Amino acid sequence: MPTYDYRCEANKQVVEVMHRLNEKINTWGELCEKAGIDPGKTPIDSAVARIITGGNIKRHHETMKLESILPK
């Protein structure tokens, strides 16, 4: 399952979570719930945006960088 980095607009924190490709996370509350972290003082309705990265695939408790498995 792929991992994604999200950035909260309100607190500027970046959080990595694992979820299905078709799943959408729109708020800090949704992100914190998915990541299993406390939202702290940031309002749970604060917007988050997915950050475009090289991506990781988590499989069997391992993380592989996509760059390491894609042909050059």
Image (cartoon, rainbow, N blue to C red):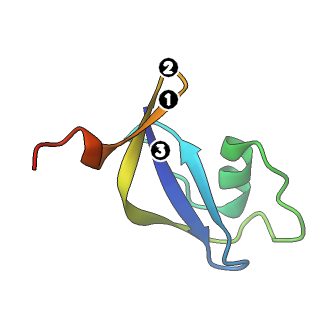
Q: Is residue 27 left or right of residue 43?
A: left
* In the foreground, 50 or 16: 16
Q: Position of residue 38 (x, y in %)?
A: 85, 53
Sequence-wise, which precedes: disc 3 or disc 2? 3
Q: Quadrant of residue 20?
A: top left
Q: Is residue 62 left or right of residue 56?
A: right
* In the foreground, 39 or 70: 70
Q: Is residue 17 left or right of residue 63?
A: right
Q: As displayed, is residue 70 above or below residue 31?
A: above
The residue type indicated by label 2 comes to His
Cβ atoms at labels 2 and 1 below 8 Å apart: yes
Task: Determine which residue is flagged by label 1.
Answer: 62
Task: Determine which residue is flagged by label 2.
Answer: 60
Q: Position of residue 7 (x, y in %)?
A: 58, 69
The residue type indicated by label 1 comes to Glu
**Is the N terminus in the top left, top right, bottom left or bottom right quadrant?**
top left
Structural distance between the alpha carbons of marks 2 and 1:
5 Å
The residue type indicated by label 3 comes to Thr
Q: As displayed, is residue 50 above or below residue 17?
A: below
Secondary structure category for the residue under label 3 = strand
Question: Is the residue marked by circle 2 packed among few (<14), some (14-19), or many (20+) residues within 10 Å?
Answer: few
Q: Which mark is residue 3?
A: 3
Secondary structure category for the residue under label 2 = loop
Q: Quadrant of residue 14?
A: bottom right
Q: For marks 3 and 2, give the one nearer the viewer.
A: 2
**Image point 50% across, 29% down: which residue?**
62
Q: Quadrant of residue 43?
A: bottom right
Q: Position of residue 2 (x, y in %)?
A: 42, 39
**Image point 73% across, 56% down: which residue?**
29
